Amino acid sequence: MKTVLLIGLGRFGANMAKELNNLGCQVMAVDISEERVNDALNYITRAQIGDSTKREFLKGLGVKNFDLCVVTISDNFQNSLETTSMLKELDAKFIVSRAANDAQEKFLRLAGADDVVYPESQMARWAAIRYGLDNILDYIELDDNHAIIEVNVPKGWIGKSIGELDVRRKFGINIMGVKQNNVLNVEITPDTVLSENKTLFVVGEYRSLQKCFKL
């Protein structure tokens, strides 16, 4: 069970705190707003009202005792930067900070963030791919070059087996699973036959996925 110090209970921070709680993590949430802290008391382990840019306040939280520190301050980048820097100075084990653009990511990493998330940018990219391309039902970015997509079975593949299609050799992609009636089956074999009412979970390079599914 991970212990998490989450700083900033705006919309993104509050939702992340809820999800961490659902995962069984022990969450200590911090925000300068008493109202935000009170609203979060139902789904966090502990809470503190205070200014995370004040070193003594941050030090008093016992930063080194948490497995993960998350900075989700959204309304003041300077405060986010200062908080990230002080967490690093106080020997936080692992720091994840929220950024709105590439410039912010650069400064946050220089300040000591071990990783940076872009909630708006990442969601915008997911939505653009999900709704801008035909037949794409879901999309998970793995890195700059690879992704997992959920895609409808192409018409030309219906009635054929995975072995027959041989997409690994032809396109350099892998079919990880087949879903039917909202049930995902990952125990597929070359003999698994594809039908119109199934969807595929496929992993590969973007260009290979684009070529294979004519995206």
Image (cartoon, helix red, strand yellow):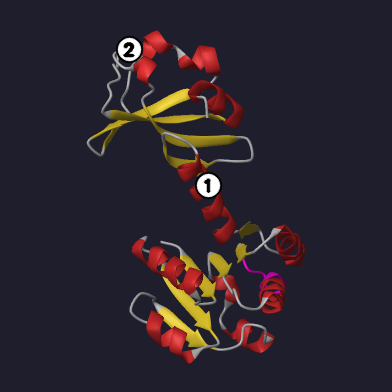
Disc 2 crowd rating (10 Å Cα; few below 14, some 14-19, many 20+) is: some
Nearest to viewer (mark 1 / mark 2)? 1
N-terminal-most mark, 1 or 2: 1
Residue labelled with disc 1: 128
Question: Label 2 sits on what residue type?
Answer: Lys
Residue at disc 2, secondary structure: loop
Q: Which residues are magenta?
A: 87-92
* Residue 74 quadrant: bottom right
Q: Residue at x 29, y 28 (%)?
A: 198
Which of 166 and 26 lies nearest the eye of the viewer? 166
Q: Is residue 99 left or right of residue 110?
A: left
Residue 79 in the image: state x and y as whole percent.
68, 79
Q: Is residue 212 above or below residue 180?
A: above
Q: Amino acid at mark 1?
A: Ala
At x 67%, y 87%, the residue is: 54
Residue identifier under label 2: 160
